[in-house]
Amino acid sequence: MGPAELAALMHDWREKPFRVKQLQRWLWREPAGDFDRLTDLPQALRRKLAEHFHLKCWMPVKEQTSSDGTRKFLFQLDDGNAIETVLIPERDHSTLCLSTQVGCRMGCAFCRTARIGFKRNLTAGEMLHQILHARRVSPAELPLTNLVFMGMGEPLDNYDHLRAALGVIFDTAAFGFGHRRVTVSTVGPPDMIRRLGQDTKAALAVSMTAAEDELRSRLMPVNRRHPLADLKAALQDYPLVRGRRITIEYVLLAGVNDSPAHVKALIKFLHGLKVKINLIPFNPAPDVPFHRPEPAVVELFQEKLHAARFTVMIRRSMGADVSAACGQLAADRLEP
Ligand code: SAH
């Protein structure tokens, strides 16, 4: 149960609202295996909870480990649907890439998740369970400190559940993640970007992939409804704490969006915005008809952005050998 479901339950049972906070702690901060351990709750409430619920813990139905140490988990949900979650080891911590929907309805031409279509939104509880599992299996020397909402689905297309999950993620009585360490990545509906900025302090990443309307609409159908000018206005207004910047993700597709003319359009679009750029050379996936540019093309693209005084990183995609890299998640292999 996420916070909204817990609040509704406590209300129905005529319990005090602060019981929600107490329960959150036992669910997410110090997960208790059984209701007897919830010692700050009255015994009658503990008994009633035990009669109606069980405290469960997710176990993946499949786990794959990449040669670079990245781990991909396949979770089966109560209704039989499946999602994937990716745990990435970094120098001194772990980063979790989590999913927000079963499938996706954004239809980006270069993304494998789009190929499986849209099944349903995840609940806040289902997002939080991914974190719980990752925290439990992260090695002590690489604690889970960073979250990126870059798995399956479009987070801002499931906004209410995302917002509820972020509440628990930032709440120091629950998970207590730092604001700088939680990034929401989106294809960029401007109205929802504005709401995210008003409601939370999460870091923002925007998937650009093209800085001209005609091309972006072809690669990312969302652009037909929300053209680049509207996106730029929303990014200009996005509230940023001092020193922080919006991440711009740009998937490089050979011969499609990787020429000097494309970089020029990108520089023009980004002019005046506080951003850092992540170039993501295309990761191949079945049925996805694009190619990764040659390294020299990627480097030239980066140099031109550098010359225009942008901070640019080339994302080293992890876990590609187990289809765990950006754009490769599909959860369509339930067999062991
Ligand atoms: N729907 C959100 C969250 C998913 S993040 C979003 O699009 O931002 C996934 C990131 O991987 C996005 O930046 C997306 O553009 C990128 N991506 C999708 N397919 C890819 C592929 N085949 N190779 C590399 N990156 C890809």
Image: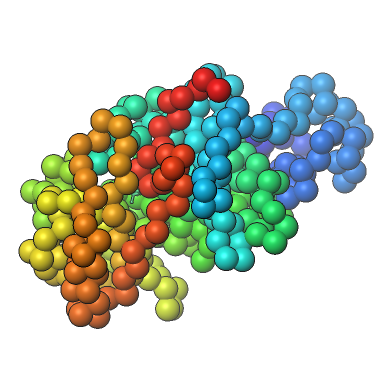
Q: For residue 93, what is the image quadrant?
A: bottom right
Q: Is residue 277 left or right of residue 58?
A: left
Residue 283 point in image, percent of width and height: 32, 46
Instruction: Residue at 32% x, 74% y: name it.
Output: 311
Residue 101 point in image, percent of width and height: 44, 35
Q: Is residue 278 left or right of residue 126?
A: left
Q: Which of the pair 74/270 is nearer the observer?
A: 74
Q: Which of the pair 78/227 is nearer the observer?
A: 78
Q: For residue 37, what is the image quadrant?
A: top right
On screen, 37 above or below 277?
above
Quadrant where the image shows the N terminus: top right
Residue 171 point in image, percent of width and height: 64, 56
On screen, 143 above or below 310?
above
Instruction: Residue at 30% x, 42% y: name it.
Output: 284
| Residue 145 in sight from this viewpoint | no
Q: Is residue 127 left or right of residue 11?
A: left
Tell how many labels. Answer: 0
Q: For residue 332, what is the image quadrant?
A: top left
Residue 56 point in image, percent of width and height: 72, 30
| Residue 15 in sight from this viewpoint | yes
Quadrant where the image shows the C terminus: top right
Q: Is residue 240 left or right of residue 200?
A: left
Q: Which of the pair 177/316 is nearer the observer?
A: 316
Instruction: Residue at 21% x, 54% y: name it.
Output: 293
How is the protein colored in the picture? rainbow
On screen, 114 above or below 69?
above
